[in-house]
Amino acid sequence: MQELPRSYEPSTIEAELFKSWDEAGYFDRSAAGFANEALDPYTVVIPPPNVTGVLHMGHALNNTLQDILVRIARMKGQPTRWIVGTDHAGIATQNKVEQKLTEEGLTRFDLGRKAFVEACWDWRQSYGSVIIEQLKAMGCSCDYAHEQFTMDPDYARAIRKVFVDWYNAGLIYRGHRIINWCPRCTTALADDEVEHHEECGSLWYLRYPLSEPVDGVEYLVVATTRPETMLGDTGVAVNPNDEQYKALLDSGATILLPLMEREIPLFADEYVDPDFGTGAVKVTPAHDPNDFAMGERHDLEQINIFDEHAVLTSAAGRFAGLTREQAREAVVRNMEELGLLERVEEHQHAVGHCYRCDTTIEPWLSEQWFVAMKELAAPALEAVRSGAVRFYPRRWENTYFHWMEHIRDWCISRQLWWGHRIPVFYCSSCGWVGASEHDLILCPVCNGRLEQDEDVLDTWFSSQLWPFATQGWPAQPGWEEELAAYYPTQVLSTARDIIFLWVARMVLSSLYFVEDVPFNDVLIHPTVLDRFGNIMSKSRGNGVDPLELIASYGADGMRFGLALQVTGNQDMKFNEDKLLGSRNFATKIWNAARYVLMHIEGLRFAPGRIEPEPATEADRWILSRLAGLTRSLNDPETRYDFGAHARRLQRFFWNEFCDWYIEISKGQLTREALRQSTAQNLVFVLDQALRLLHPYMPFITEKIWQSIPHGDTRPSLMVAAWPDDKALAAYLHPDAERRLSLLLDVVATVRSVRARYGISPKQPLAVVVRTAGESAASHAESLSSLSLMLTQLGNLASFTAGEDADRPDNASVTVTDELEIFVELEGLVDFAVERERLSKEQEKLEADRARLESKLSNQGFLSKAAPEIVEKTRTDAAEMADALSRIAAQLESLPR
């Protein structure tokens, strides 16, 4: 038994405890030999953070939730492994290294490809483990001894095998397509790597002259949000059912493209919306995916007017050399000078941006590598429909279905140097092209020298293999046995914004290569927003650093405070007050443990695990509450209800154990006949509660557990047995819970009356209780039998309970579901003065609330005031309404 310091200071215990867990080998699947190999294994893969990353609130929440699940499984004895590692993050890492080179006055081209890749490895060596160390500071119990990296040699072999197998199966192909191009990163992006922002732009109405007038019509008007792309137009399209253009279509009219003097066709296509703009749309096949599709249907020329930096090429004629923005100004100015700009309207529309650097995306005709997705998507759809993979909450299955049912081919090539180079080789001598899992130097046909494709693979191509490539597939010795024993993994916890980017692709690649799903459950955790509902970001200045929170509240305070805020909603407004409350909760746990240690000092306990001895109604009540709590936390249907479980744990420990049982135990410990049994019950309940709290608050629970005489032979709470609800079921006692519930209602009422009227706790009070309902007689009997405990807890001068008990004069009244509780206040309170005080307070609050409600009904205030001011006004108004409700209840309860 160790003595606990007077105050709880997280910083003095966390690093030391984490080191002890790590050195003991508890993070390994065997948990240093404490795992039960006969039980089902429990494996989780961490969503690999970018090697460039630092901990943010999304990481903090998600890794807290994962660690809760992992620690519970480990305590249940399951062979548990939380696979950890980092993603090489192609674009992000390359940007970091290029920024460093820029500071040195260099570019990657000055270094050359080989030296630049080496610089990326150097950067990873210096900074790549930052986020891993931050995970340790959180207390995450990952398998750090087998850390993974998506550029490791074994992982690279897996990626090559996937590419080559799909290439040989005809599922990977190279083709000219419109792709999303980032001019800043100079690389292609997949559709789901593009973030669309609503922007207020313009809709320009441009006159396109006909080559020859038709029935007096000299021009058409087209509407566009991007006038600069008209330089690449190769047609104008209208809907075939649009009557206003029927004569022009029948005549075979053509258009003379302004500024370029190029004759282009007018044609009909069902894609055109006759209600948008004028019903006629300019068609630029090389710079719009829908125009590209129309161009292929109508055999239009594809003219690419932009280079890789979104600067106009010679294909744009006299506008060559201008940026997109400069070209837009020049085109609009020239069209206006020619009298061909009809009008300009404001237009709200979604504009695509690079998910890494936020540059506006350019739809660009380019030769890229693609994965044909439809064939792969079919079994992945069925895996979720059949229940082999289940989403929590279930509503996210509809999101998954929608994307998979409308899936497009995946552009997997990136014009970067950092990443997995595409394993395709070309022979310039004979034209041979092939993919290989190994580097090739000479052509297998003519023996000529081969060149490898310059592009690298999309980062998501490598991360889709994470669940099985991290377990040795396809080349590490024993990988078949590893997957047979530990695959699929049990749960993936991740964010909703990568359901398409990552989750879906893991499912389809796992089914193809391992012939099994990668995980059984997909837990979509809420997105952490600021308290006003805004996305957290550096640019907004509203980001919160989890490490600063750990410094302020301890890792346990941050973890528990985050878990408390989890609900079934898809967004979570971060409330730092919950972390402060959790820090206070940790202090409460600490002080409760010190109380127990202090009051068991000098007692002797039998060898082995301490068992409870329920000798009093209070003993039976607390043990029954513990058994009920354990049963609810072990319910498999609620295993992902983290917030509800955290609130139950806090309510049990703080309200039931500390506020009530510990308070009751003070009297029991003074009675020699009850001292030993009460001490055993205190230790037993504290031990079990620490076990239940440990996954949420690992540090403080471990420190306390190692200080109490629990009798467990295991050296750490981390590998101690998880509470067994079936074993504890023997202590369920509904009658004791019912009787103590009545007692607690009475004591709580007495304490509330003291606080309301400023009556000293030392002043004894007389209490009368009238019982009601079908169980009135038994309730009266129960309360009478507990009168001694009531008198001690409430400091009562007298206590009476009965079905027909009369209400005393000058008594407050509180009504519960089954009781009327009267507290005699004769000579203690001047009721006339109290009524006047409350009435004045009520009047002032009503005036203040009316003022706030007036502001909140003013649209000018709502639209112009800062969001935090509006939110505070709403909060203040709600608090005033609550206060008014309480005052009304107090006025009602005043004696007649």
Image (spheres, grey):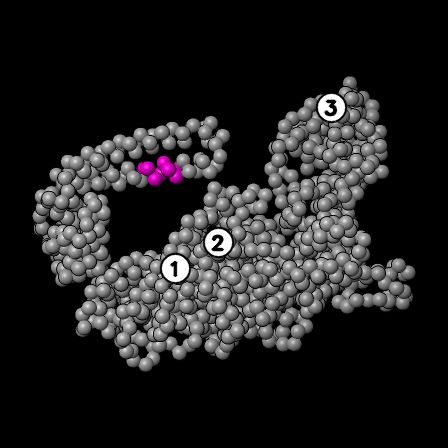
Regarding residue 630, the answer to whether it shows in the image is no
| Disc 1 residue type (three-letter) | Ala
Image quarter in which the C terminus is found = top left
Residue in the foreground of this view, choosing between 869 and 386: 869
Q: Nearer the viewer, mark 1 or mark 3?
A: 1
Rendered image: mark on residue 341: 3
Report the residue at 78% width, 59% height from top.
115
In the rendered image, the vertical position of residue 725 relative to residue 455, given as above or below: below
Q: Which structural element holds mark 3?
A: strand
Q: Position of residue 522 (x, y in %)?
A: 52, 58
Residue in the foreground of this view, choosing between 126 and 184: 126
Q: Position of residue 586 (x, y in %)?
A: 39, 59
How far apart, in angstroms, are the residues tagged by discs 1 and 2? 15 Å
Rendered image: mark on residue 625: none
Rendered image: mark on residue 586: 1
Image quarter in which the N terminus is found = bottom left
Q: Position of residue 622 (x, y in %)?
A: 27, 64
Q: Main secondary structure of the magenta part?
A: helix
Q: Nearer the viewer, mark 3 or mark 2?
A: 2
Regarding residue 583, the answer to whether it shows in the image is yes
In the rendered image, the vertical position of residue 575 relative to residue 17, given as above or below: above
User: Label 3: how many residues lie within 10 Å, few (<14), some (14-19) or many (20+)?
Assistant: some
Which of the marked residues, 3 or 2, is nearer the chain's N terminus?
3
| Disc 2 residue type (three-letter) | Leu
Residue in the foreground of this view, choosing between 785 and 545: 545
What residue range appears in magenta? Answer: 874-881
Rendered image: mark on residue 549: 2
3 and 2 marks in contact (CB < 8 Å):
no
Q: Is residue 198 magenta?
A: no
